[in-house]
Image (cartoon, rainbow, N blue to C red):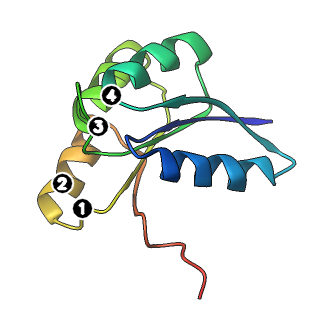
Amino acid sequence: MIRILAADDHALLREGIAAIVGNQTDMELVAEAKNGREAVELFRQHQPDVTLMDLQMPEMNGIDALSAIRAEFPEARVIVLTTYTGDVQVFRALKAGARAYLLKGCCARN
């Protein structure tokens, strides 16, 4: 079972991830964070296999949360899931330890 933490300040996106993951037989959503600080706390509690992390969140942004998680758990697998397309954001996320950088519109069905 692949254990997932979703961190995004938009409840609708978290609900969408929960619905998609809930339809998979080999995945489970173990926690949902609405800000970066909560993402770090929930990562410590659940130590998920994969974390889906937004960049712009209140209290602590995704880059800072990613850095905090990777400092404590160097093997953490974090995928940035965002709307920001700029190279600067991509490089910052990868430098902080993101394993991948996906745009929220990347997987839309037509």
Q: Report the Cα–Cα distance between label 3 and label 2.
A: 11 Å
Q: Amino acid at mark 3?
A: Gly
Q: Report the Cα–Cα distance between label 1 and label 2.
A: 7 Å
The residue carrying pointer 4 sits among few (fewer than 14), some (14 to 19) or many (20 or more) residues within 10 Å by Cα, namely many
Examine the rendered structure and indicate whether residue 5 appears above or below residue 84: above
The count of marks equals: 4
The residue carrying pointer 2 sits among few (fewer than 14), some (14 to 19) or many (20 or more) residues within 10 Å by Cα, namely some
* Contact (Cβ within 8 Å) of mark 4 with mark 3: yes
Nearer-N-terminus badge (3/1):
3
Q: Amino acid at mark 2?
A: Gln
Q: Residue drawn 29% across and 37% down? A: 62
Q: Amino acid at mark 1?
A: Tyr
- In the rendered structure, find residue 89 and report the number of the disc placed on it: 2
Residue 90 screen position, x and y as percent: 23, 56
Reading the image, the residue beneath label 4 is 36
Reading the image, the residue beneath label 3 is 62
Tag 4 secondary structure: helix
Q: Nearer the viewer, mark 3 or mark 2?
A: 3
Which quarter shows the N terminus?
A: top right
* Contact (Cβ within 8 Å) of mark 1 with mark 2: yes
Nearer-N-terminus badge (2/4):
4
Q: Residue drawn 32% across and 20% down? A: 37
The residue carrying pointer 1 sits among few (fewer than 14), some (14 to 19) or many (20 or more) residues within 10 Å by Cα, namely some
Residue 16 screen position, x and y as percent: 60, 55
Which quarter shows the C terminus?
A: bottom right
Reading the image, the residue beneath label 1 is 84
